[in-house]
Image (spheres, coloured by chain):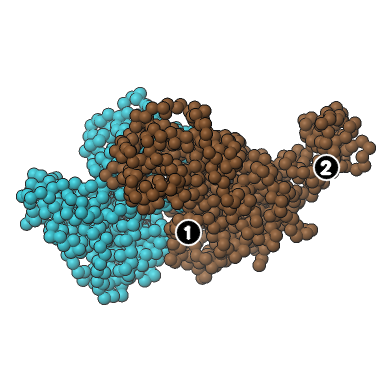
Chain colours: A cyan, B brown
């Protein structure tokens, strides 16, 4: 992780004589210099210092009807935890967060707060919203650095057993809640390390892997058994798990099936799915080759195709591996699904954007190695079904971008393995598992699902939100309808703004 | 010296008196085949390849030992000579893996696999790092190998890979004696000689000690003179034949030995002595460590400048500008501290810069650190804080000095405490990357050639110093090339001699270079007890992992591993595979399941050692734990009653077809198993195979047993014999599966192959394993691995499989060095688990 995530003593810009709350601007978070970070995998934002955190937390006006909570898919009591930070009670703030969110250090870093909690913040109407995400991260890092977090209490054993398939954010969340309520939980994970996308997808410079492993260890402390290297569907099927004495099964296998462009030349050497590219670097640590054995990718000029967060991660990773890094996206900037902050970080670090550009062909040499990509320029036409203006090709505008690496980052489909091997599981034509949004129960009794396998590739926090709901229904299912402790979550609302 | 004249093959040849017949012929451009002879060795007459006929001389004298005499009439070619030479070759090659020499598919195979496979044991030329430079092969081909009777009698010696820097596989040794003779010539008392007698005669050290303990100086002469792949430079071996050999000078220590720098393109792969003599020999550092320093992954590659407490990568101009400004801020109390390891041109410019700045100049011998800084007063002034700023080109300042200094400009090739504390870091080209001259301790001025590209943005030191001087507004530094500096150097003192010459003993090896501990960069130097900074352990062993129940090398290079994997065994089906990771740092590597026992919860795989991942696995000992086992993966082979099935297996595929044969047989098919290997000593699992099939047919590439050829020849034989074949399955190397598919295609016989592209996860989430089948992209791990062999795009598969060929060559020695640096703990030299002899 390089440096302590929580900085002490660095005086914040704005602690002059106590100004009126509403006037204090939103506190920026110090970031590593882009010139330095583009050459290594250090985390980009450095986190708030204690002083800055207090200043920022004091901006919260403690609304009577806090909308922010509704914007949070796991309904964190935001005003409360923010107030605790403002009081300097950092550990208490952390414990408050933990009540609703099992992975605050993760969410504080990767949640799209600007469309969730912060989008609802009343302060945002006139001024800028309270930096809820940064405060969440601050409290979580504080707790990790200072230690002494009391081990969560476990309810007495219920004798019930739950199998959780997939150790991504959904699986981790379900497992954490159920274990806390006294059930015996076993997580089966296909890969050799638990964490799902948090481990193999999201890069180190955005989410240090040490944080994910710290959270996983906490889960183990709760008595959750995590069995890695165990591919459900190839080993046991869901039916077999139920027969083998599990009272319920949760499927959180995510959306891990990469899509390709389907253009000529796509199987040339140097064309990667974002999944492969990121997995080699993150999970397999190819950037530490040859200490780690997985062959590294050494791009000189990398083109990433796509405009989402995964594309941003890929392009910025390529940059760190020494490449000139280009993004090719067929729509314009406003249509880019990636978080504005990530696009901004990418730009700062030197990622070049070719917008309104569509790949048509990948060119390669005699040994089938990529030499470039042929693209077509696009212009925006009429809006399509999604309401976004449809890009239409400009005739004769073909041009070639030279490259030795192409990273295809145009989305992932749900993992088909479990649905394929559970014939009576209802699935949609997109391959996602059908689950009742209020209970996350599937069409198969005793089987629940959540996360990307239900919603299609989405976000960490929405996976966790669904997992929270699933955990409660699993508890009720196994305990003859009895409610588990704690508040039932309200269903996440689509942000009003 | 007088000239004499003689007749060779009817030509009048004139040579200096005292030459041998062989030399006379060679001078005249007449080739006589030789093996044990070498220009730097005295004639030995051991191999008897160079026999000739001389009028009036009885029998067939060896031309290498016969002095040319006036009027001699020599014949180098005759039917009898040919027969005799062939007998000699046969004798030599019968103990040498020679399958490829007589293989009917050799040309296609070598075209398909332009690089030899990085195998553990060399069981054929295709697995031999010497292939591109092999004289034996040349001789054998000249002699028409098909006419030679050369069964391979594999000696089954353990691989010797426990010593630093060198790999030895005495199963290839032809006892030409070049190695021990050159060792004796160079060192007087050879570290190696022929040990044992008769059938078990081989080369080795006295009492079979490790080379580290044997008095070997690691000069590498034996490796470089061995005509076979027996002795190999671990780091360089798989790069193949160097593309250039350039004379240069080693500047790792003041001895300044002449070297021949071997490069592959822009990469330095080895240094070799310029001639095999005691005067020109090299030490372990110059021969082996040098390329590893040059190619170290931790090299400094970008200029850095400190801003806001952090070192920020910046462009050269800003870095130089920042350095100039910072130094000017301390004008009057600046020092230049330079290592003596650089070229004279570099040293001259450092001195000149110090002069122009009015700065103090300190020097450090090239093999020393901060303690050896001269002059003493400067050391004191650095400690007292009298000096505020320093320009320094190595790890040459101690901790307390670093704490005193206000401004440090580090010009260096490797990171150190100094570069970490510096305000500006300027990455420097080093050793073989910069051109110039070097004055060695003996006072000689020698040329240093730039033969390899410096990494990233690193620049030569003279250029850095020139630009820094210019950035500070100093004049007199307007050089366009290092050679323009050379004439300015009028009096440069020779560096001090080392107290003991490293070339004479590994105990004399210096441990530092520019202040850096060499063993930090070249880990295996720890075997010589060279100092190193404490390094962190790579990764702790997995807490749990999967127990290795059984581990055997069933035939050379082919290992059987039985692993406790209770989550896999009950679900395994024929045609599936598992992903194994020996350690947490390993790759996820796929291996086909050969057998499983649901009750015992165990699985069996056959692993052929062909690179880093397989080597890590086969080096484990029974009882060890494999970090990760994941599976079963892939779609099982469809087991149906089809009639007569032929299953072709080669390499690891022999094991892989076993469970499929068993299941197909149980399903009521007539099962014919066709297995192939390079020679009969490489066939395995025959009795197991027999028990699950109706007919077991064998093919060998060297014709030592069964059909001469491979499974495609067996198939052709079956067709010719009128046997009915309903479908065909081929599992083995890509080449074999392709050949088999091509053989069955004209007959329209459905053919299944198990593809083996590079994989990452093996569960269908990355697409690394993409293959084109029938024009459609498939993921081999999730949709396969078994596909219709007639629809596979084999060329694409071949290319995709070679995507990381270069990286694999780099990864192997790294891993091997790490293993070898634990050599002291090794119980025996076969200790990396590659032992064929039953203990
Ligand atoms: C590169 C990248 C960047 C992203 N960035 C963000 C971000 O900044 N913010 C954000 O909110 N979201 C982000 N996302 C999306 C987010 O990571 C996912 O929405 C979230 O991880 C979904 O969680 P999950 O638990 O449903 O699935 P996953 O995290 O995909 O976990 C599924 C797990 O199940 C395992 N599994 C699959 N099949 C089986 C099986 N048969 N048996 C056993 N185990 C199995 C998989 O190996 C995996 O570990 C990003 C995604 C990617 C790829
Ligand atoms: S030394 Fe190597 S290349 Fe030469 S014949 Fe032997 S196996 Fe073949
Ligand atoms: S090791 Fe090489 S040089 Fe030495 S005897 Fe054997 S083949 Fe000849
Ligand atoms: S003795 Fe070794 S290190 Fe010194 S110059 Fe010679 S080869 Fe290089
Ligand atoms: S190995 Fe990753 S999809 Fe096949």
User: Are there few (<14), some (14-19), or many (20+) residues within 10 Å of tag 2?
Assistant: many
For the N terminus of chain B, which image quadrant? Answer: top right
Query: Please, is residue B574 above or below residue B6 in the view?
Result: below
> Closer to the camera: disc 2 or disc 1?
2
Task: Give SS at disc 2.
Answer: loop
Residue at 73% x, 55% y: name it.
Answer: B193
Identify the residue at the far front of this view.
Answer: B377
**Residue denoted by label 1:** B583
Label 1: chain?
B
Q: Position of residue B839 (x, y in %)?
A: 66, 67
Query: Please, is residue B804 above or below residue A487 in the view?
Result: above
Residue B123 in sight in this render: yes
Mark 2 vs 1, N-terminal side: 2
Q: Position of residue B326 (x, y in %)?
A: 31, 38
> Front-most of B278 and A391?
B278
**Residue denoted by label 2:** B65
Q: Position of residue B368 (x, y in %)?
A: 49, 49
Mark 2–mark 1 distance (CA, rounded to whole Å):
55 Å
Q: Specify the quadrant of the image occupied by residue B542.
A: bottom left
């Amino acid at each position: 992780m390089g440096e302590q995530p929580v900085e002490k003593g660095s005086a914040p810009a704005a602690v002059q004589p106590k100004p009126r709350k509403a006037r204090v601007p939103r506190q920026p978070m110090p970031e590593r210099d882009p010139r330095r970070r583009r050459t290594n995998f250090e985390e980009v934002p450095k986190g708030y210092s204690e002083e800055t955190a207090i200043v920022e937390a004091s901006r919260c006006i403690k609304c009577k009807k806090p909308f922010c909570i509704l914007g949070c898919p796991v309904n964190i009591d935001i005003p409360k935890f923010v107030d605790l930070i403002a009081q300097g009670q950092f550990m208490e703030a952390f414990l408050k967060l933990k009540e609703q969110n099992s992975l605050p250090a993760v969410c504080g870093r990767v949640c799209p707060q600007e469309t969730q909690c912060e989008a609802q913040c009343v302060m945002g109407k006139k001024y800028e919203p309270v930096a809820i995400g940064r405060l969440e991260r601050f409290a979580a890092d504080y707790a990790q650095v200072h230690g002494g977090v009391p081990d969560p209490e476990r309810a007495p054993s219920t004798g019930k057993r739950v199998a959780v398939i997939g150790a991504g954010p959904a699986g981790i969340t379900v497992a954490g809640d159920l274990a806390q309520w006294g059930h015996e939980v076993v997580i089966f994970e296909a890969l050799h390390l638990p964490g799902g996308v948090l481990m193999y997808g999201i890069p180190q410079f955005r989410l240090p892997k040490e944080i994910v492993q710290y959270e996983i260890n906490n889960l183990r402390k709760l008595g959750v058994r995590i069995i890695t290297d165990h591919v459900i569907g190839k080993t046991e099927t869901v039916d077999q798990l139920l027969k083998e004495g599990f009272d319920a099964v949760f499927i959180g296998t995510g959306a891990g099936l990469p899509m390709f462009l389907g253009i000529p030349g796509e199987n040339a050497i140097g064309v990667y799915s974002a999944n492969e590219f990121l997995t080699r670097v993150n999970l397999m640590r190819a950037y530490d080759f040859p200490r780690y054995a997985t062959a590294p990718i050494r791009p000189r000029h990398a083109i990433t195709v796509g405009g989402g967060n995964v594309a941003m991660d890929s392009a910025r990773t390529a940059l760190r591996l020494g490449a000139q890094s280009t993004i090719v996206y067929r729509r314009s900037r406003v249509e880019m699904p990636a978080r504005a902050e990530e696009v901004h970080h990418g730009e700062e670090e030197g990622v070049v954007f070719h917008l309104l550009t569509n790949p048509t062909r990948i060119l390669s040499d005699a040994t089938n190695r990529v030499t470039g990509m042929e693209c077509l320029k696009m212009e925006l036409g009429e809006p399509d079904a999604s309401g976004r203006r449809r890009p239409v090709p400009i005739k004769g505008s073909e041009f070639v971008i030279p490259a030795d690496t192409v990273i295809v980052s145009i989305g992932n489909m749900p993992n088909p393995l479990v649905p394929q091997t559970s014939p009576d599981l209802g699935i949609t034509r997109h391959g996602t598992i059908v689950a009742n949004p209020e209970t996350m129960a599937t069409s198969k009794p005793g089987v629940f699902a959540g996360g990307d396998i239900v919603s299609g590739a989405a976000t960490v926090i929405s996976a966790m939100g669904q997992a929270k709901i699933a955990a409660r229904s699993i508890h009720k299912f196994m305990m003859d309808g009895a409610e588990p402790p704690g508040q039932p979550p309200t269903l996440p609302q689509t942000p009003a703004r | 010296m007088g000239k004499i004249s003689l007749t060779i093959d009817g030509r009048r040849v004139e040579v200096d008196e005292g030459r041998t017949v062989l030399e006379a012929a060679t001078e005249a451009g007449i080739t006589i085949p030789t093996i044990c002879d070498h220009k730097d060795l005295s004639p030995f007459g051991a191999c008897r390849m160079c026999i000739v006929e001389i009028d009036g001389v009885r029998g067939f004298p060896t031309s290498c030992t016969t002095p040319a005499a006036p009027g001699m009439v020599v014949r180098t070619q005759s039917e009898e000579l040919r027969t005799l030479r062939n007998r000699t070759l046969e004798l030599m090659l019968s103990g040498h893996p020679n399958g490829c020499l007589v293989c009917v598919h050799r040309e296609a195979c070598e075209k398909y696999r332009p690089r030899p496979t990085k195998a553990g044991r060399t069981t054929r030329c295709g697995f031999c790092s010497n292939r591109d430079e092999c004289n034996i092969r040349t001789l054998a081909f000249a002699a028409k190998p098909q006419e030679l009777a050369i069964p391979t009698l594999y000696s089954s010696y353990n691989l010797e890979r426990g010593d630093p820097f060198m790999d030895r596989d005495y199963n290839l040794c032809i006892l030409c004696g070049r190695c021990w003779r050159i060792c004796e010539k160079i060192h007087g008392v050879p570290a190696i000689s022929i040990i044992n007698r008769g059938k078990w005669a081989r080369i080795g050290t006295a009492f079979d000690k490790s080379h580290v303990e044997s008095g070997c100086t690691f000069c590498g002469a034996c490796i470089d003179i061995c005509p076979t792949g027996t002795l190999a430079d671990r780091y360089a071996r798989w790069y193949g034949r160097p593309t250039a050999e350039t004379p240069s000078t080693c500047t790792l220590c003041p001895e300044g030995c002449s070297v021949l720098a071997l490069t592959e393109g822009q990469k330095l792969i080895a240094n070799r002595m310029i001639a095999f003599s005691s005067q020109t020999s090299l030490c372990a550092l110059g021969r082996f460590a040098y390329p590893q320093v040059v190619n170290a992954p931790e090299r400094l590659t970008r200029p850095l400048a400190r801003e806001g407490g952090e070192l920020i990568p910046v462009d050269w101009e800003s870095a130089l500008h920042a350095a100039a400004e910072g130094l000017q801020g301390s004008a009057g109390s600046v020092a230049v501290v330079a290592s003596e390891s650089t070229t004279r041109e570099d040293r001259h410019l450092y001195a000149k810069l110090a002069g122009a700045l009015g700065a103090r100049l300190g020097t450090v011998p090239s093999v020393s650190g901060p303690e050896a800084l001269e002059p003493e007063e400067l050391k004191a002034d650095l400690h007292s804080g009298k000096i505020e700023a320093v320009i320094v080109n190595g790890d040459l300042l101690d901790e307390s000095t670093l704490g005193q200094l206000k401004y440090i400009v580090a010009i260096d090739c490797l990171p150190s405490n100094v570069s970490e504390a510096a305000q500006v870091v300027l990455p420097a080209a080093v050793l073989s990357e910069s051109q110039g001259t070097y004055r060695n301790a003996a006072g000689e001025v020698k040329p240093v050639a730039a033969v390899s590209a410096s990494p990233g943005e690193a620049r030569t030191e003279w250029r850095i110093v020139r630009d820094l001087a210019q950035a500070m507004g100093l004049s007199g530094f307007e050089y366009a090339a290092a050679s323009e500096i050379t004439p300015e150097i009028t009096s440069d003192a020779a560096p001090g001699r080392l107290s003991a010459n490293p070339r004479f003993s590994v105990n004399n090896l210096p441990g530092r270079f520019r202040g850096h501990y060499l063993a930090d960069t070249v880990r295996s130097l720890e075997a010589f007890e060279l100092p190193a900074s404490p390094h962190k352990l790579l990764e702790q062993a997995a807490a749990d992992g999967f127990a290795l129940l059984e581990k055997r090398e069933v035939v050379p290079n082919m290992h059987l591993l039985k692993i406790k994997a209770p989550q896999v065994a009950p679900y395994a089906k024929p045609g599936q595979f598992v992903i194994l990771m020996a350690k947490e740092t390993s790759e996820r590597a796929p291996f086909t399941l050969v057998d499983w026992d649901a009750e015992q919860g165990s699985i069996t795989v056959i692993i052929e050692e062909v690179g880093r991942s397989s080597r890590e696995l086969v080096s484990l000992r029974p009882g060890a734990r494999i970090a990760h086992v994941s599976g079963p993966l892939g779609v099982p082979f469809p087991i149906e009653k089809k009639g007569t099935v032929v299953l072709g297996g080669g390499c690891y595929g022999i094991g892989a077809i076993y469970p499929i044969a068993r299941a197909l047989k149980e399903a009521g098919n007539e099962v014919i198993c066709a297995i192939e290997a390079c020679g009969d000593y490489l066939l395995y699992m025959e009795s197991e195979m027999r028990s699950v099939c109706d007919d077991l047919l064998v093919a060998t590439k060297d014709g030592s047993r069964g059909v001469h050829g491979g499974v495609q020849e067996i198939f052709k034989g079956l067709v010719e014999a009128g046997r009915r074949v309903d479908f065909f399955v081929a599992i083995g190397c890509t080449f074999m599966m392709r050949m088999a598919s091509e053989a069955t295609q004209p007959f329209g016989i459905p053919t299944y192959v198990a593809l083996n592209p590079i994989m990452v996860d093996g569960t269908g989430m990355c697409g690394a394993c993409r293959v084109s089948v029938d024009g459609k992209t498939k993921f081999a791990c999730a949709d396969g691995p078994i596909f219709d062999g007639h629809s596979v795009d084999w060329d694409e598969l071949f290319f995709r499989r070679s995507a990381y060929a270069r990286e694999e060559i780099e990864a192997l020695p790294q891993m091997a060095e790490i293993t070898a640096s634990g050599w002291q703990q090794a119980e025996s030299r076969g200790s990396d688990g590659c032992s064929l002899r039953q203990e």
